[in-house]
């Protein structure tokens, strides 16, 4: 699995877009970029994935650089319920969780 | 929609005892993963099963064993428990197409996590 690097923590004002960066320079060709989040001791929750192209779903958008060495998760209108640890994972199958980014949404 | 079920939700054991954790995957999911999350730590992959066969192995101690049964549920057996085994144990399931499409690209693998079993070893 790819080694990923994320900032340990970030704050975002409620209602604003939260942009979470991730570096995954060692990602290999068949590994997807996955984003999961974990809300205080709950089971991790899948958010979005991508391979080469930018992706969007009802939860978030994922922007992947052309060289695939980094990506950004965008939560377009952050709410208090988005406060969680966000994990960026480069993987084919099993998930190797790094330290993630602790995102705090501020009222 | 049905989710991953784990039982028990909480378990308290003494050192050197044994524990069995159970996981019931989402119907029609063929792959089960086990993760361990110690206090203040990030989840760590332990082991996975695909179609009742072990498919991958992570940092699982030799004192632990696991299997997947014919109904696809899985059990994690933990023996000679130590204080350091106190953790949240998550099970996840997925339906993972291990083949490659016409584009030659692998399929993605969305894992659905259960609520976890909190094991406390005293």
Image (spheres, coloured by chain):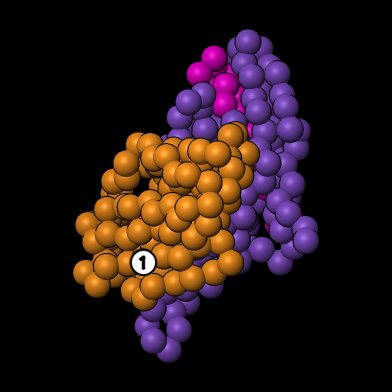
Chain colours: A orange, B purple
One can see residue B65 in this view? no
Coordinates of residue A28 in the picture (x, y in percent): 27, 64
- Please identify the quarter of the rendering in which residue B52 is found: bottom right
Q: Is residue B29 magenta?
A: no
Nearer to the camera, A19 or A6: A19
Report which residue position mark 1 lands on: A63
**Residue positioned 38% across, 51% down in the render:** A20
Secondary structure at badge 1 equals strand
Q: Is residue A90 above or below residue B88?
A: below
Q: Magenta segment, which residues? A: B70-87
Q: Is residue B99 above or below residue A98?
A: below
Q: Quadrant of residue A102?
A: top left
Note whether A54 is above or below B40 in the view shown: below
On screen, residue B5 versus residue B87, left or right, reads: right
Report the residue at 50% width, 19% height from top: B84
Q: Observer-nearest residue: B52 or B98?
A: B98
Pick the front one: A87 or B29: A87
Is residue B104 in sight in this rendering? yes
- Magenta span has B77? yes
Give percent across and percent down for residue A79: 58, 48
Residue A25 location (% of width, % of height): 22, 57
Q: Is residue B11 left or right of residue A39?
A: right
Q: Quadrant of residue B28?
A: bottom right
Horizontal side of A93 relative to B90 (left or right) equals left
Which chain hosts label 1? Answer: A
Which corner quadrant holds the C terminus of chain B? top right
**Residue B60 locus on image (x, y percent):** 47, 36
């Amino acid at each position: 699995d790819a080694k990923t690097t994320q900032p340990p923590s970030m704050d975002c004002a409620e209602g604003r877009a939260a942009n979470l960066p991730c570096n995954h320079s060692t990602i290999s060709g068949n590994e997807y970029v996955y984003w999961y989040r974990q809300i205080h001791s709950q089971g991790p929750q899948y958010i979005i994935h991508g391979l080469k192209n930018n992706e969007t779903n009802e939860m978030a958008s994922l922007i992947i650089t052309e060289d695939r060495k980094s990506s950004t998760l965008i939560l377009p209108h952050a709410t208090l319920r988005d406060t969680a640890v966000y994990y960026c994972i480069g993987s084919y199958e099993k998930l190797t969780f790094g330290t993630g980014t602790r995102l705090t949404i501020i009222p | 929609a049905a989710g991953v079920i784990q039982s028990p939700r909480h378990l308290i054991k003494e050192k050197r005892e044994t524990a069995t954790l159970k996981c019931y995957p989402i119907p029609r999911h063929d792959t089960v993963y086990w993760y361990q999350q110690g206090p203040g730590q990030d989840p760590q992959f332990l082991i996975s099963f695909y179609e009742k066969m072990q498919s991958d192995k992570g940092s699982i101690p030799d004192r632990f064993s696991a299997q997947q049964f014919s109904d696809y549920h899985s059990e994690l057996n933990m023996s000679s428990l130590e204080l350091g085994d106190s953790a949240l144990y998550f099970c996840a399931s997925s339906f993972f197409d291990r083949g490659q499409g016409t584009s030659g690209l692998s399929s993605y693998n969305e894992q659905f996590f259960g609520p976890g079993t909190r094991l406390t070893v005293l």
